[in-house]
Amino acid sequence: MTADKHLQSWQERFELAEAMQPLIGKLYRNQGVEVLIYGRPLLNSSTIEITKAHRLVKKYEGDKLRLRESFPFIEALSRLNVKHAKVDIGKLAINYWRNHSSAEEIDAYMKEHLAPAVDKDVEQRDVVLYGFGRIGRLLARLLIERTGVSNTMRLRAIVVRGGREGDLEKRASLLRRDSIHGPFNGSIEVDEENNALIANGTYIQVIYANSPDQVDYTQYGIDNALVVDNTGIWSDEEGLGQHLKSKGAAKVLLTAPAKGDIKNVVYGVNDSDVLDSDLILSAASCTTNAITPVLKAVYDEFGINNGHVETVHSYTNDQNLIDNYHKADRRGRSAPLNMVLTSTGAAKAVSKAFPELKGKLTGNAIRVPTPNVSMAIMNLNLGKHTTREEMNEYLRKTALFSDLQNQIDFTASTEVVSTDLVGSRFAGVVDSQATIVEDDRAVLYVWYDNEFGYSCQVVQVMQKMLNATSVVLP
């Protein structure tokens, strides 16, 4: 009987997860609403992934969230005209069931808590990816997975050098298959005649150009577009300003640290500095995005007198597969075979997004033989004494309920390793089991997917630049 009971329970959960999937899909496609469970997006999730997301709630709250308890909230959400919002059904459900014994008031409860997003209209804007490397292809995946009539950002084109025979199919193949992030979730067709890719119904023009000012986007029906430069070739206003000479380009975002007076934006920390008048912005680096939200959170609660950040970073395309010439020290040595001590400007770059820490941090980096997922080790001298328990509890609550909930994740697992974080959509993940605190000194360990997590941050900066930011509720 016990075995039958467990199987019946699993069957019930599986069927509820299956019933959720079409509702979740329609909510996004028709209304631009992303459904989450404690920060985990359910869009395009499998039934198993939906079930696992519910199980994770117990780690945060101590209480289970059953699918039969959350399903009525998804149904209620589908009856409301909520638009362009991220709605955490898990948090709403847990809060409701702690104060109610029946489902009678769910509709009224949802209407009250989701009022800021009812009838929220956002103009659809064009996006161009200039460059199609690691970050460019992940940005494409993120934009394509959100395909729908309510999508606020449409990927219209990619710009690359080349144009040799077979180039288009090669580009398509690299988008279809990824050694780290797995296969593309959908279908990709190649339109050789028109130099285009069609991915999940999204028509993407492939434009060949050797410099930004050679492109006329309007001839492809693209206008007032945001150009996302992920080539890494230009980092100053003069170089990036070339994009603005192209017809149809309105704004430029660099997916790397910028030089000069260009604002380096870490979403969640200083995105309020973004103005409509800003034509060129930077999304800073993956490491700066990973550490700045956590540093801000710690600074706000405990103060930071000074500190050192050591980055244990996966190797990148800038390094060599085998020993060969490289203009930088040590980076010429084989990346898959060596730990390579190198420099990083990420610690100093924090002050561009969070000036309160200017001059207070030093930093260094070690490149290691892993292809993705990195770690920042932050050795901090705090402004006051605290304990390990207080620090971890504060960061746990910050990850769940603060304005930084989309940037900071938190794990209490004693078994987590780097590959477990591949595909993390957060800027950084605090490893609470590694936290060390003694009096006014703390050592924090923060994991981050330096490719995908960073790309998710870039997408949020893109939305901010285009006034297409989703409301986060609750």
Image (cartoon, rainbow, N blue to C red):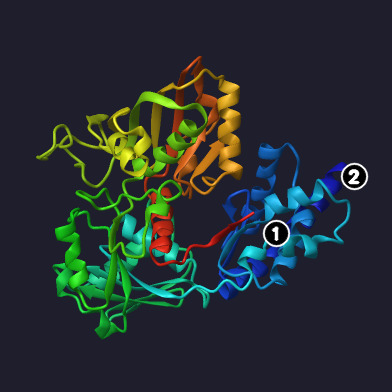
Compute the Cα span from label 2 to label 1. 42 Å
User: Residue tagged by mark 1?
Assistant: 113
Query: Does residue 429 appear anywhere in the picture?
Result: yes
User: Which residue type does callout 2 highlight?
Assistant: Met
Q: Position of residue 52 (x, y in %)?
A: 65, 48
Q: Position of residue 347 (x, y in %)?
A: 31, 34
Q: Earlier in the sequence, mark 2 or mark 1?
A: 2
Which residue occupies the foreground of this view, 274 or 166?
A: 274
> Which residue of the protein is positioned furthest toward the top in this rendering?
439
Q: Label 1 crowding class (10 Å Cα cut-off): few <14, some 14-19, many 20+?
A: few
> Which label belongs to residue 194?
none
In front: label 2 or label 1? 1
Q: Residue shown at 40%/48% (left/top)?
A: 270
User: Which residue type does callout 1 highlight?
Assistant: His
Q: Label 2 crowding class (10 Å Cα cut-off): few <14, some 14-19, many 20+?
A: few
Q: Quadrant of residue 42?
A: bottom right
Q: Is 256 situated above or below 333?
A: below
Q: Residue shown at 22%/51% (left/top)?
A: 261
From the image, which quarter does the N terminus lie in? top right
Query: Does residue 369 appear anywhere in the picture?
Result: no
Dot 1 lies on which element?
A: helix
Q: Position of residue 184 (x, y in %)?
A: 44, 63
Q: Is residue 30 left or right of residue 235?
A: right
From the image, which quarter does the C terminus lie in? bottom right
Q: Quadrant of residue 44?
A: bottom right
User: Residue tagged by mark 2?
Assistant: 1
Q: Is residue 81 left or right of residue 314?
A: right
Q: Position of residue 82 (x, y in %)?
A: 64, 69
For the residues labelled 2 and 1, say whether their Cβ atoms are less than 8 Å apart: no
